[in-house]
Image (tube, rainbow, N blue to C red):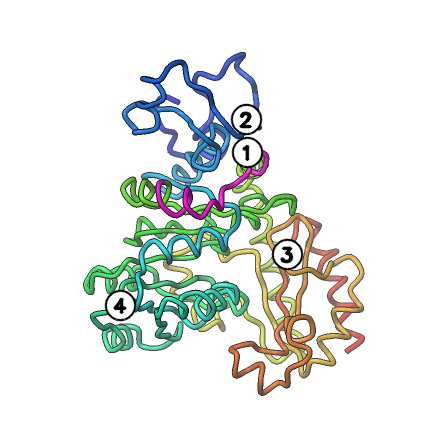
Amino acid sequence: MGNDPSGFGTKAVHAGEGGRVPHNPSSTPIYQNSTFFFDDTTSASDIISGKKEGFVYTRSGNPTIKAFEDKMAALEGGQAAVAFASGMAAISAILLEVLGPGDEILSCRRIYGGTIAFYEKVIANINGSVKYFGPYEDIRERIPALVSKKTKLIFFETPSNPELSIVDIALIAGLAKKYGLFSVIDNTFGTPYLQRPLSLGIDCVVHSATKYIGGHGDAIGGVIICSKAFAKKMRTGMLLDLGGCLSPFNAWLFLRGLKTLHLRMDRHCETASELAVFLSKRKNIPSVLYPGLKSHPGHAIAKKQMSGFGGMVSFTLENRRACGRFIDRLKMVRTGVSLGDAETIALNSGTVFYSGLSDAECVKKGVDPVLIRVSTGLEDAGDIIRDIEQALKGV
């Protein structure tokens, strides 16, 4: 679309869209079709071989999906992007593309549970292995001690789900380059508005677009942003062969969501900060985890690599019974497993996912049974805090 705009908000609105679209629509059209016809066999051969730009089958590409991919690449400052049917489809495709039988992953221990499940259920089946490091270990010493000839990839999140741990992005990127590892970050909580890992040396960024990218709780999708070379490998390999493609309609919903990402994230961050301060003053709350608080162990690093501290707040209560009573007393705040929506959502994994396990068994799995994760929504901050305050009185 001509000169690339420099401002984030301008890119969020314009990048990837426009160009030669018939009738000049104000919104990128939904190309709701599976197949694209060819003018002749020569054209078909040229498009399929990559000699000529065009589309063949929506599983490997589609104009609406491409607009979303181009916008995400622009916002993350990457060369290219590839969209998938979900965040886990994107993560699994990256891991299967990079890793072969017997290869090894270095992974931060504090990551999304679905990613750990993929390690245990799929990577283990190809004789792969995972070595873990903690977010607040001495990474300069820990990672060199873990690297072996089998190590191919390093994976982490920051802020992490759900503890909001912070990892030094530039430090990981530097170590990955030193030891020849492909570096991957899940930037779902950070979003490209708050932090841009590619500019700090990371090789590949992945998002669950279901969350803040979409922002309205109405679409599931994932996306990776990386080099042109890796994107081409992913598109012609894992995307085409595994078939985990994004639907054109969901791509359109994500395009719509991205136009207000910067505005929404400002509101999410502002409300989360107010909530964190409120919770930190309560005597009956053992701990409050929010990167914007000076008491957070990763505050200094977060301040260095993020332009804002995010819309997620986590805190603990005395026991799981208290967590259950708190959740059940909420009125406006909803209970659910996702995040990044317009509605404020609270979740305690200990009472929802792991009710059949003891506290000790939860801890062994890396789950804090008394931690409550709050995804602050777009409601008035005062109303969110009042609802949480009245629910806390019941515990």
Q: Nearer the viewer, residue 329 or 19?
A: 19
Foreground disc of the pair 2, 3: 2
- Which residue is farthest top? 23
Q: Main secondary structure of the magenta part?
A: helix
Amino acid type shown at disc 3:
Thr
Question: Does residue 9 appear anywhere in the picture?
Answer: no
Looking at marks 1 and 4 on the same chain, the residue that comes earlier in the sequence is marked by 4
The location of residue 311, given as percent across then percent down, is 57, 56
Q: Label 2: few (<14), some or many (≥20) within 10 Å?
A: some
Looking at marks 1 and 3 on the same chain, the residue that comes earlier in the sequence is marked by 1
Element type where label 4 sits in the image: strand
Q: Quick check: marks 4 and 2 in contact, CB under 8 Å?
A: no
Q: Nearer the viewer, residue 112 or 200?
A: 112
Separation of disc 1 and disc 3 at Cα? 28 Å
Q: Which residue is mark 2?
A: 31
**Range drawn in magenta:** 236-250
Q: Label 4: few (<14), some or many (≥20) within 10 Å?
A: many
The location of residue 334, given as percent across then percent down, is 73, 58
Amino acid type shown at disc 1:
Pro
Element type where label 3 sits in the image: loop
Q: Which residue is mark 4?
A: 151
Q: Which residue is mark 1?
A: 248
Amino acid type shown at disc 4:
Thr
The location of residue 146, given as percent across then percent down, is 27, 76
Foreground disc of the pair 3, 4: 4
Separation of disc 3 and disc 4 at Cα? 38 Å
Separation of disc 4 and disc 2 at Cα? 41 Å
Q: Quick check: marks 2 and 1 in contact, CB under 8 Å?
A: yes
Q: Which residue is mark 3?
A: 376
- Which of the 4 image quarters holds residue 168? bottom left
For the point 68% across and 58% down, the residue is: 345
Looking at marks 3 and 4 on the same chain, the residue that comes earlier in the sequence is marked by 4
